[in-house]
Structures are given as C-alpha cells and as structure tokens.
Image (cartoon, grey):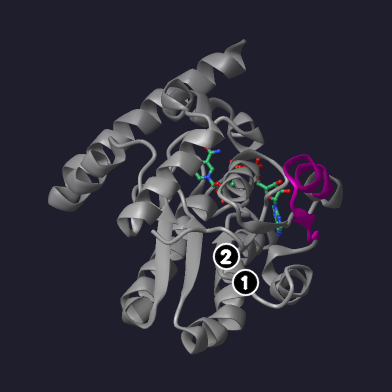
C-alpha cells in the first residue's frame, strides 16, 4: 500500500465509536483527516483530540464542505455513519426511511460526488462500514439488516465497476464492537454480540490489514467468514439456527418482562 502521508480522508459518523478509531488511525498514518458527525460537538471534540478538522452535518451532504476543509481533494471516503433501527415491518415509515438514508443513500450520494474526480485522477478509496448484519442478519432489527445488505451490495457494485480504474473499495463487516450503538441494542445485542465484542481500534487494525492486502471484505471477527459460507451452502440450515436463536431471545425477553 502506498503511504498515506499527506493524503486526505473523510470519516462520517466520526464523533465516536468505530469512526473515531478510523479517524485516529488515519491521522497516525500521516493523513489529513476531516471528522464528520451529525453531532457537531462530538465531531469537534474528536477532531481536536486527534489533530483533524471537524466537518459537522449530515453524512449525505458532506463532501463539498469536507473537500473545502481539506484543500480541494478527498482521496479516501469512509462512509461510516450508521443508525441501528430496531423492529420489523411494524417499524414506522420514518424509521425505515432514516435507516435507508443514513445506512445506504449517504454512501450513494458521497460516491456520486466523488467518483468523477477519482476516475479523472486515476485513484480513490471508498470504505463502507457495513456490518456482519449485511452478510447475515441481525435479529430484532429488520431495517438495520435490510439496509446493511444494501450497503454491502452498493460497495460490491462499486468495486466490480471501478476496480480497474483505480478505485479501491472495502466493506467493513464487524459483529459486536464496544460503542454507544452496541450499548443501545438491548437484549438482542447482549445475547448475540456482547460476548465476542471487540474494541473499535481492532476494527481499524483490520481495515488497515485489508488495505495493505488490497482486499475488499474486512472481517474483524474472522469467524464471520464461516457463518457467511454456511449461509450460502445451506440457507435453510442457517435460517434454522437463526430461528433457534430468535426463540432463545423471546424466552429471555419473556423472563425479563415477568421480572
Ligand atoms: N457497534 C457495533 O457493534 C457495530 C457492528 C457492526 C457495524 N457497525 C457500524 O459501524 C458504524 C459506526 O457505528 P458505531 O458502532 O461506531 O456507533 P456510534 O453510535 O458510536 O457512532 C455512530 C455515529 O454516527 C453518527 N451519525 C448518525 N447519523 C448520522 C448522519 N446522518 N450523519 C453523520 N453522522 C451521523 C452518530 O452521531 C454517531 O456519532 C455504523 O455504520 C454501524 O452500523 C457497528
């Protein structure tokens, strides 16, 4: 991998968690970094701490401001902001729409702004923080599972379409990571994710390994590869296992409700 010294990087949702760890790591590698977050105070605090610039606002419309803050170019874009919407079909239209908007369309809109310049200069890097939910599923959260599958599909499409023209794409697909989002996942997160949860810095390490190897899929939990293969090999068996876990989850929720 070429040195990142002096290259420019944007990290959306960088005001905490995985985004802050990615931003910190890029700064440590010598890049000039713009930290975006919807929460301006969080973006500014992280930027100040790590020696980056803050570009607060909605991840969907951040490219022009980030480009200006970084002196005209964005070499690497980390589409990391995400929302963990709970529920199934009964979740409201507005919740589904927010999940689509942040988890998918923010990636599409950033790429729309960036790809023409990347093709012209012959290089660019698009990092999508997806989730193992984009390869598998997340019990208790249909909007999250569906939109993360879509985010993975978009990253795959980008890689398949532009790889030979100098655009590197990476899809980061962790299981549980100790962040505010994980803390908000309640009983399902406790049952499925907590035990094997890792620190955000381990996600950054995993991305940098993949960047060095020119690898698309970033699996900070290596066991995810086995689950993904098992799902492809025998979908019914895999779904049977997921349904078993759902029944376990329902039993725990019932116990909790009974006090
Ligand atoms: N924590 C996990 O277990 C886990 C696992 C797999 C994938 N992920 C993914 O990692 C990414 C980062 O999540 P995290 O775990 O660090 O959570 P987090 O809650 O710590 O960070 C998410 C950040 O995104 C910001 N944000 C939300 N909507 C935004 C918007 N429209 N524009 C700009 N910023 C916005 C939030 O303010 C927050 O600071 C998400 O895409 C999430 O889906 C998390």
In the drawing, what numbered circle is on residue 220? none
- Above or below, 18 against 214 in this view is above
Q: Residue at x 57, y 47 (%)?
A: 22
> Could you say which is closer to the camera, residue 232 or residue 179?
179
Separation of residues labelled 1 and 2 (CA atoms)? 7 Å
Q: Is residue 19 left or right of residue 193?
A: right
- Residues at circles 1 and 2 in contact by the CB criterion of under 8 Å: yes
| CB of mark 2 near ligand 1 (< 8 Å) | no
- The residue at label 1 has a CB less than 8 Å from ligand 1: no
Quarter holding the N terminus is bottom left
Is 216 one of the magenta-colored residues? no
What residue would you read off at disc 1?
A: 74
Q: Which residues are magenta?
A: 44-56
**Residue 168 percent coordinates (x, y):** 40, 68
Q: What residue does disc 2 label?
A: 77
* Residue 28 vertical position relative to residue 244 in the rendered view, above or below: below
Residue at left offset 31%, top offset 75%: 160
Q: What percent of the width, then of the height, locates residue 217? A: 34, 54
């Amino acid at each position: 991998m070429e040195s990142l010294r002096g290259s420019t990087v944007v990290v959306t949702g960088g005001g905490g968690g995985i985004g802050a760890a990615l931003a910190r790591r890029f700064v440590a590698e010598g890049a000039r970094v713009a930290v975006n977050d919807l929460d301006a105070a969080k973006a500014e605090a992280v930027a100040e701490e790590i020696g980056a610039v803050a570009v607060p606002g909605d991840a969907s419309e951040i490219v022009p401001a980030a480009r200006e803050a970084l002196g005209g170019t964005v070499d690497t874009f980390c589409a990391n902001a995400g929302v963990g919407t709970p529920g199934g079909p009964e979740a409201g239209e507005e919740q589904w729409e927010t999940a689509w908007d942040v988890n998918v369309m923010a990636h599409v809109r950033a790429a729309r702004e960036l790809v023409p310049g990347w093709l012209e200069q012959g290089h660019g890097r698009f990092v999508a923080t997806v989730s193992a939910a984009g390869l598998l599923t997340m019990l208790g959260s249909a909007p999250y599972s569906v939109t993360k599958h879509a985010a993975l599909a978009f990253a795959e499409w980008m890689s398949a379409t532009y790889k030979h023209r100098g655009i590197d794409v990476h899809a980061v697909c962790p299981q549980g990571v100790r962040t505010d989002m994980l803390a908000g996942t309640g009983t399902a997160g406790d049952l499925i994710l907590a035990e094997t949860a890792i620190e955000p810095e381990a996600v950054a390490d995993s991305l940098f390994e993949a960047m060095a190897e020119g690898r698309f899929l970033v699996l900070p939990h290596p066991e995810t590869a086995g689950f993904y293969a098992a799902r492809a090999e025998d979908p019914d068996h895999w779904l049977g296992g997921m349904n078993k876990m759902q029944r376990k989850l329902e039993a725990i929720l019932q116990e909790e409700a009974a006090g």
